[in-house]
Image (cartoon, helix red, strand yellow):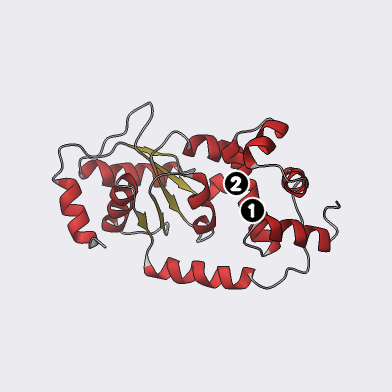
Amino acid sequence: MTPPTALLFSALSSPRLPSVRVAVRSAMLRAGIESLLAAAGLTFPAGESDVLIVDDGWLDDPEALADALAEAAGVVALGSAAWANLLPELTGGGWAILSTDATPAELLAGVLGAAAGLVVMPPALFQRAEAEAEAEDAPPSDVTLTPREHDVLVLLAEGLSNKRAARELGVTESTVKFHVQALYSKLGVQSRAGAVARGIGLGLVSV
């Protein structure tokens, strides 16, 4: 694995630095991030960019999130370790998860790593993600699904692929993947078959 310091020096000395779109909900945080990255020579084009920076506010709007992620090669998520369960499914490129109080060096390393197709996660956040994953292994006793999550679970029970489910619901395939990952998290499972079985057991879906 390339050491972070070597990654920074290598990327900063390359002829082209990645472009960035900062899409966090706080205007103050956005201005601070752009100032830090601009000082390192990164740019912020009005159109498509190489790396998208988001925060937990996007978790409330999965369809908009899926569309935004489809336009960037890499993504940096600031906030919850829950992103570790979502980003591998939602993006085909590199990604990073950082705390909202990440240092300038951590932020820059996250952006450069995501642009290079790498996965970047601070040790503390990695440990939190592991702890949350272990907690998800315990069978849930009270599960509440959103209407869209229930629709996706029903289609999973019917054996539909993500692509066919997306066509059936009139949404993008990335959006369906987002809802599938949300189902895995809420139901405490790691597979489609597990989600269907747990959903049947909890009376959330019938076959």
The residue lying at 51 percent from left, 55 percent from top is: 83
164 relative to 84, above or below: above
Q: Residue at the far top: name it.
A: 47
Residue 150 in sight from this viewpoint: yes
The amino acid sitting under disc 2 is Phe
Answer with left or right where residue 183 lies relative to residue 53: right
Q: Which residue is nearer to you in this view: 164 or 64?
A: 164
* 3D distance between C-alphas at marks 2 and 1: 6 Å
Identify the element where label 2 is drawn: helix
Snapshot quadrant of residue 195: bottom right
The amino acid sitting under disc 1 is Ala
The image position of residue 19, as x and y in percent, is 30, 36
Q: Are marks 2 and 1 in contact (CB under 8 Å)?
A: yes
Answer with left or right where residue 102 lies relative to residue 148: left
The image position of residue 24, as x and y in percent, is 46, 43
Where does label 2 land, which residue?
178
Q: Residues within 10 Å of mark 2 (few under 14, many from 20)?
A: many
Where does label 1 land, which residue?
182
The image position of residue 41, as x and y in percent, is 20, 40
